[in-house]
Amino acid sequence: MLIFMMSKRESKQELAPTFYNLPAIQAAANKKMGISSKKTLSILQRLYERGLISYPRAEPVHVTEEESKTFPTILDNLKEIPFYQQHIPDPYPDLTKVKRYTDASKTDDHYAIILTEEKVDPSTLDREEKVLYDMIARSMIAAHLPPYKYEQTEIIAVIHESFSFKAKGKKTIDLGWKRLYPRDDGKGQEAPLILHVEQGEYLDVQSMQLSEGMTSAPKRFSQGDLVQLMSNAKAYMTEEEKKDFTKNELSLGTVATRADIIEKVIKVGYIRIEKNKVYLKPKGRLLMEALKEESFFTSPLTTGKMEQTLSEIGKGKQTYHSFVQRVAEITQQRIPAIQERSHAWDFQSYHHYFQKEESIGACLACGEEVIELKDFYGCSGYRQSHQCRFKVNKKIAGKSISLRYVKDLLTKGQTEFITGFQSSTKEGTFNACLVWDETKGKIGFRFTR
């Protein structure tokens, strides 16, 4: 017997997103095209130099009232492009007083990334320029469209007075601004709207099934995630750590320098990018191990405290000289302390990571680098928390496995047909491909080509 303890159905709506700033469009472009933050900035700079968009190195997501007054002209221009014409409302809503988009108090020397009043012929833009121009154009049109409206149902039910569960359903009433962003990947489909039931209503339970599941680890960062993380490091800290700081105080770098910082970290060999995912390289892991007790050099809290002090200097409450003196004192204390502890560092377990300068490929089990060791090719993730045990022995069934075979296995999931494997009885040989069995999580044989 099932009884409904609570049944709730309500109408909701969702407003169009705010305009882009640089971190947001870098993350979105990375997700859409897989390009780096630095390349996104370079493309935006080209559009800016042609007078097609506002200054791209912008942190705010709002505009001033003066800029908002240019929107009708911008929409008029977009109407000359067939795709946009069908989505632009008539008449245009006035956004000059809409605080979600127009708020001078939330701008600085710059404002959100928007289109200018300059007309554009899309055929004069290259592919990547078209994509970014289109993203900005849609964000501006969306702000003028009605909200996305939907109906949501939620029920809480109890079965046999022993088990309770919650179910939610959703039904679109009006797509509104979401018409500009059609989904063609099959993702994000709505949960079916639950039939209306009354509180206290009883139903017979026809069948029940218990299923077992496992939680997944957080997704690995993409390049776009990195720039978002740097602009909002506060989101990755504990409540206790961040309670005395604002979001801006705990941001890393500036809107104009974050892409270059990421590029430098890649260039010096601390991280690598594989299929748009970020992986820590042995050199980066070693640096973290060496500085794990030195939060002054590694924590965003240091940035936060410095930002607060610089703000105090700007208000005349502290002096520049006292700030520089304090930084010098801390540095003079910490560096000798690190040098003293360095005698006790034991990085013996890391030496094999550096036996080869280059990675052979990405691990089929976890995505980390596969490197060549003495007797096998193994995943460099073994020493990390997940202790990945992926490996390919240099000799399998009496047959030497060359580096070429391993590279094929890592890139294609299988090798070519290999002859001369020795049978387990030692009485003959057999031919087979080496393949990666994802279900079993290990290397196996396939006896057909």
Image: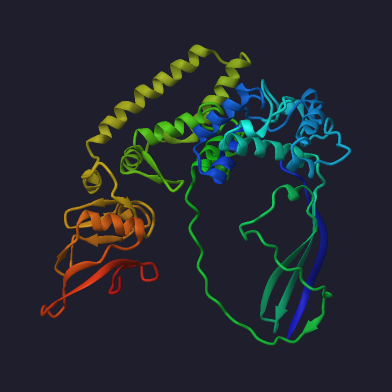
Please state which of residues 114 and 226 is positioned toward the viewer in this rendering: 114
The image quarter containing residue 138 is top right
Please state which of residues 348 and 342 is positioned toward the viewer in this rendering: 348
Residue 149 visible in the snapshot: yes
Residue 237 visible in the snapshot: no
The image quarter containing residue 400 is bottom left
As displayed, is residue 366 above or below residue 285?
below
Tell me the quarter of the image containing the N terminus: bottom right
Residue 58 point in image, percent of width and height:
62, 27
Residue placed at 82% from the left, 75% from the top? 197
Q: Locate residue 339 relative to residue 279 in the image: left or right.
A: left
Please state which of residues 240 and 357 is positioned toward the viewer in this rendering: 357
The image quarter containing residue 418 is bottom left
As displayed, is residue 316 above or below residue 416?
above
Tell me the quarter of the image containing the C terminus: bottom left
Of all residues shown, which one is farthest toward the left?
427
